Amino acid sequence: MVDRIDAKSALLVAAAVVVTLASVSLPFVSGFTAVAVTQSLAAMAGAVFAPAITGITLGIVGAKAFTARVGRNEAFNHAGNAVAAALAGGLAWKFGPQVVFWLMGGLAALSIAATLSIPAKAIDHDVARGLDTKKGEDHGPAPSMWQTLTHTPALAIFAVSAFAFHLANAAMLPSVGQLLAREVGGGQATSLIAACIVGAQLVMVPVAVIVGKYADHWGHKPIFLVGFAVLALRGILYTFSDGAAWLLFVQLLDGIGAGIFGALFPVVIAAVTRGSGRFNAAQGAVSTVQGLGGALSTTLAGTLIVFGGYNLAFLVLAAIAAVGLALYWFAMPETAERS
């Protein structure tokens, strides 16, 4: 959709409206079905943001400035997440957890105002698709997700690597949250989890800026390998102690791994698909695969926790990250144009 339409800003606004309504409705609904429906709608709308924002970014700055600009985007993204988490933690401690949903709704409304301030004429929609041919040339119907992945081997390898990263990463913070709730009680757990998120997001800010600034010079591959290595190390370190201070400290490492992944994810896809006109379609295909990894991660970790405890779950997640590292090292080509 993002590749095909020129109304990318309007698409972002529509998605933000859905997220806002889903957020502010939560204090008024109860029961598993109602909560699942509202959160599913929010997740569906949330899938719009990454391809639309990166598409708009590419359409404004072009391919040469894209890596540095994505790094800056991610820095602002993580700074916003940190501020939101800090506000959520503080307001939840003061007024109760329901205020968080009102906060998220208000921030989504502010994002609409920011989106509407983007000049429509500043976006080259051909460049936003990843085209490097003369304006107006089309490449035919968009391929299916399977064709998008299989017709570009490097993209398929990257998708499997992203699957492994999220399979290892997604369950770590929820598992840490359960440990914190067990150690300190439910009353303080929400604020401590918010502290985990704030700390990691603050680390991601400089990581994203550095990656965006130097990735094309250092190479994408070695930086991604560092992200996988830090993720594996994080899973191992969680097994050393259940203390709240230790868990908070180890969670800071998420700022390095996830910061690298967030800053390089669209950059690698843009490099692999350059000239195809299917940049955002490729993002959607890889995001679908990595989303499956994230969805399976919590199920896998929960099962392991029930049958073998938290340490077993963290060690298995670390092993998955190590497998992802090996795959990226041996199978993924370098995607940076160092010149």
Image: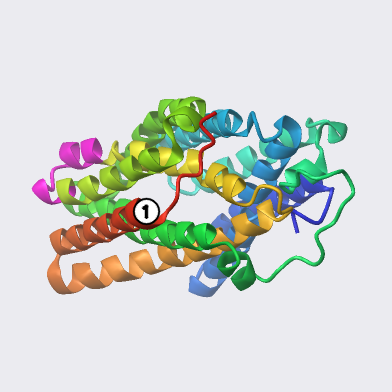
**Residue 16 magenta-drawn?**
no
Report the residue at 29% width, 51% height from top: 177
Is 106 or 321 nearer to us in this picture?
321
Can I make out residue 172 in this image?
yes
How far from the left and from the top, in percent, is residue 4?
Answer: 80, 56
Looking at the image, residue 324 sits to the left or right of residue 42; the answer is: left
Q: Quadrant of the N terminus?
A: bottom right
Residue holding disc 1: 328
Magenta stretch, residue numbers: 238-250
How far from the left and from the top, in percent, is residue 148?
Answer: 63, 65
Looking at the image, residue 326 sits to the left or right of residue 313; the answer is: right
Q: Main secondary structure of the magenta part?
A: helix
Is 1 or 216 nearer to us in this picture?
216
Residue 31 to residue 335: above or below: below
Residue at the left extreme of this rendering: 240
Give the quadrant of residue 251.
top left
How far from the left and from the top, in percent, is residue 43?
Answer: 58, 59
Q: Quadrant of the C terminus?
A: top right
**Residue 246 magenta-drawn?**
yes
